Amino acid sequence: METDENMLDIATYASEAAEHRHYLHAHPEPSFEEWGTQRYITDRLHSLGLNPLPIAGTGVTATVVGTRGSANGKVLLLRADIDALRLTEETDLPFASQNEGVMHACGHDGHTGTLLAVAHWLVDHRDQFGGTVKLLFQPAEEITPGGAEPCVKAGVLQNPNVTFVFGVHLWNILDFGKVGLRAGPLLAEADRFELTVTGKGAHAATPHLGADPIVAAAQIITALQTIVSRETNPLDSRVVTIGTIDGGSAFNIIPQSVHMTGTLRALSREDAELGAASLRRIVTHTAEALGTTAQVDYEFGYPPVINSRESVAFLHPFLQQAAGEGNIVEPEISMGGEDFAYYLQQVPGVFVFVGTRNPAKGLTAPHHNPKFTFDEDIFPLAVSLFVAVVRGYLS
Ligand code: NI
């Protein structure tokens, strides 16, 4: 069990995490433009005596070797994402964004602050773990293709070879202090598509002389929902959303074409591929039935985040010890995407949600909302979870 002394110890690192978060929150940078963030992280790691290296452009990686027992060949990758969103902040936080139009509205400032504090703990407590901890401050989680795949391609899982990976997401959907641990899918595959329906422009008063892409687009949008309602097992989950629709220039003109973008989400790559095939079929043939043609550009996005049963069972007792009895819960699956999936495709590991929703303090704004922030009292638990995984896995 954690001794009280250990918990006191954690409190000092947790307050460092909050300080880092304040700086990062005030200086947010969008995906793959995190140069100042990279400099901040690199400076902090240097000051701890570590040897940080850039990765995938704006990312940072560093290793900390433990001294407990003989080196056992285990390498634990701890990952935090570091990017912000193109969004204008509407909080009145004293450390609100100083970069107009950019905001840490997903909690990645908290992830980065936590991992910097954990880096300090690791340097101070090398005698409490064996093997190697690899820290990864990953750029560009918020866009596709994002930063995880380039980090994997750049060899973050090699030299030394990573044997287990752990990451968290602060989660305003989950109550404060709960840890959402789930075997199986936790986040969805998130694909993106573009549709162009081309007809034949005409005067609005003479539809018989043209081929109306707006009517075709309307039927396509409606028909696409049958992928969810008629082609998905009712006990399974898929989402089809058209996010933009763009066509026409005047009330009395039938336009030449309509352009749409959207996303299809599923809990496995197989389901996403089936969905993509259905989407192509429905779009192409609906357009054809109405005398128009359609072009489909489909881009497979992040794979789903899937925690293996064995890894979850292994970590459960360590996370429970850090979070306290009754605080490990099975969270609702999110149909959002997360590129942590790329690490889990290569090595065993676990991704968890850390609950930060606190209605008593009015902290309930959803992620990606201009009023988003989270309860900073979560930092002791966030740091403890990483420490528990280090001590549990690298014992
Ligand atoms: Ni996020």
Image (cartoon, rainbow, N blue to C red):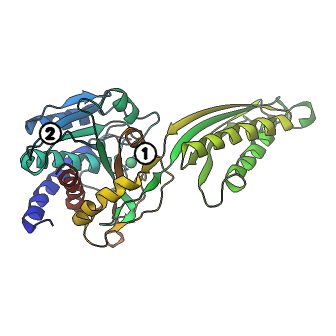
User: Residue drawn 13% across and 45% down?
Assistant: 130
Q: Which residue is mark 1?
A: 338
Based on the displayed image, in which of its 4 quarters is residue 18 positioned?
Answer: bottom left
Give percent across and percent down for residue 167: 31, 48
Q: Residue at x 13, y 60 (%)?
A: 11
Left or right of 282? Residue 107 is left
Q: Is residue 34 left or right of residue 17?
A: right
Indicate yes or no: mark 2 CB to ligand 1 under 8 Å. no
Q: Residues within 10 Å of mark 1 (few under 14, many from 20)?
A: many
Above or below, 319 against 297 in this view is below
Type of amino acid at the residue the image marks with label 1: Glu
Q: Amino acid at mark 2?
A: Val
Secondary structure type for disc 1: loop
- Give x and y (percent) for residue 101: 38, 41
Is 225 or 203 nearer to us in this picture?
225
The x and y percentages for residue 156 are: 29, 32
In which quarter of the view is residue 373 placed? bottom left
Residue drawn at the location 37% of the way across and 50% of the way down:
106
Vertical placement of 80 versus 197: above or below?
A: below
User: Does residue 1 appear to the left or right of 30 in the view shown?
Assistant: left
Q: Nearer the viewer, residue 52 or 243?
A: 52
Q: Secondary structure at mark 2?
A: strand
Classify 243 as above or below 202: below
Circle 2: is it few (<14), some (14-19), or many (20+) Cα within 10 Å?
many
Residue drawn at (23%, 53%) of the image: 389
- Is any part of residue 352 visible from this angle? no
Q: Nearer the observer, disc 2 or disc 1?
A: 2
Q: Quadrant of the N terminus?
A: bottom left
Q: Which residue is mark 2?
A: 64
- The image shows residue 155 at horizontal and vertical percentages of 31, 28
